[in-house]
Amino acid sequence: METNDPDMVRVMTFLPQQGTPLEGFREKSNLSELKIISVLRLMFPKCLIPASLDLEGIDGMVYRLNAGANIVTSILPPIPDWKALQITTAILKSGTET
């Protein structure tokens, strides 16, 4: 990755999708993602590292920022029906819409 001299590096929690071979996979926590963000910050001190607001709302974003992320990102769909997006399934179930 260093040879590409990136401006931004990113890591995201894996979200299993229904009908795929890994649909039954469940990560017990987001600790792996937070550790990777920390390592990326050490490796790329000048890069942008996004903290997603979509998966766990404000609390998850704060954890990511504390781990080393330095910008906030969010998916804002151009459609009024959030249920049309696969990635928002976890958000809708948890009630942490952003």
Image (cartoon, rainbow, N blue to C red):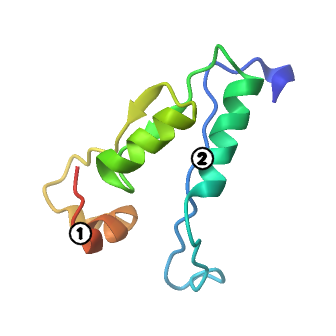
Which of the labelled discs sits on residue 62, or is there none?
none
The residues bearing labels 2 and 1 have C-alpha atoms spaced at a distance of 28 Å
Please name the residue that numbered disc 2 is placed on: 34
Determine which quarter of the picture holds residue 5.
Answer: top right
Q: Is residue 66 above or below residue 58?
A: above
- Would you say 61 lies left or right of 43 here? left
- Residue 39 image position (x, y, % from top left): 73, 35
Q: Nearer the viewer, residue 63 or 90?
A: 63
- Would you say 67 lies left or right of 52 here? right
- Residue 64 image position (x, y, % from top left): 49, 40
Q: Residue at x 53, y 31 (%)?
A: 69
Q: Amino acid at mark 2?
A: Leu
* Residues packed near mark 1 inside 10 Å, few (<14), some (14 to 19) or many (20 plus): few
Q: Residue at x 55, y 58 (%)?
A: 30
Residue 13 shows in this picture: yes
Q: Is residue 54 above or below residue 41?
A: below
Q: Residue at x 49, y 82 (%)?
A: 18
Q: Quadrant of the N terminus?
A: top right
- Residue 83 image position (x, y, % from top left): 23, 69
Please name the residue that numbered disc 1 is placed on: 83
Q: Residue at x 56, y 37 (%)?
A: 67
- Would you say 1 lies left or right of 68 here? right
- Residue 76 image position (x, y, % from top left): 27, 44
> Dot 2 lies on which element?
helix
Q: Nearer the viewer, residue 37 or 77?
A: 37
Return the residue found at the far right: 3
Label count reads: 2
Q: Amino acid at mark 1?
A: Lys
